[in-house]
Image (spheres, rainbow, N blue to C red):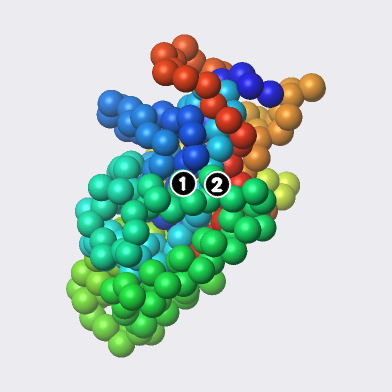
Amino acid sequence: MTRPRRRLEVPIGAATLLLGFEGPVRISRDGRAPDTLVSVYCGPTTMPAVGEHSGRISGVEVLLAPWAAFTLFRTPQHELANRTVDPDELPHGLDSSLGELACGLAALPSWERRFALLDEVFGRWQQSGTPSSERVVRAWSVLVATGGAMPVPRLAEEVGWSVRQLEKRFREQIGLGPKAAARVLRLQRARRLLAAGRGPAETAALCGFYDQAHLSGEFKAMTGCTPGEFSRARRAPSGVAPVADRMSGEATSLVLPAAAVDWSGPGADFSKTRRAG
């Protein structure tokens, strides 16, 4: 298939690095002017984004735990939250550029060798990067494990910090404050339960929302649609391939009607995804 494609991507508990080989993607969010890039870094976000491409694109998408992105790019992550940037514009002390890595990946003949190169390069960069706080990593792990259900004061107590200390270090190394990060993780769990067939009322109770209206309001704020609208939009019409989500077992994406976009050239093969951190 070489038709243009347009997708709604909802917030997930990860930073995203797309190492593109050829063919740009166009990403817009929150009414801002869209960014058109071949390789893309998207920091942690609490809002949806719309990505478009001209047909088929080629590249590797790496999903990074936010603290791992802090280590790799040596940049306070709050500066990158809710943003889309060219990864080569990020300040870092890497021994080569992300653009060079993308070219190296494109030149390899198989996905197995590409993933081996990614493992080798990212392992080396992580060893030489800015260490993330063990307490931040622990706090993040607790939030992930509880689906965002751990109250911030209890989370601070769990890692031996004051709430103020936790908020400061979370914004630096995760990009979002602990409360905002918990919202994203809680809604991520809710999407997973809804996709598995749970009803909205039951999902709201299981995920710690006050009620179904609270769930619906949070869903609308972070995805742009209600739980019902999201579920209906994910039901692919007959003869149309279902949406490929960015995370296994997660409901992260919606295919939208293609819009007229002025593309400078053809795309290539659609990207594979790799998780890290």
Q: Which residue is mark 2?
A: 107
Residue drawn at 44 percent across, 53 percent down: 101
Element assignment for label 1: helix
**Residue type, mark 2 in image:** Ala
Depth check: 271 or 76 in front? 271
Q: Which residue is mark 1?
A: 103
Q: From the top left corner, tell me how far across and down residue 115 is, in percent.
A: 59, 59
Element assignment for label 2: helix
Residue 34, image quadrant: top left
From the viewer's perspective, tell me whether residue 13 is left or right of residue 164.
right
Q: Quadrant of the N terminus?
A: top right
Q: From the top left corner, tell me how far across and down residue 72 is, in percent.
A: 35, 65
Residues packed near mark 1 inside 10 Å, few (<14), some (14 to 19) or many (20 plus)? some
Q: Residue furthest right?
A: 238
Q: Residue 142 got which mark?
A: none
**Residue type, mark 1 in image:** Cys
From the viewer's perspective, tell me whether residue 39 is left or right of residue 114.
left
* Proximity of marks 1 and 2: CB atoms separated by less than 8 Å: yes
Residue drawn at 38 percent across, 47 percent down: 99
From the viewer's perspective, tell me whether residue 91 is left or right of residue 230.
left
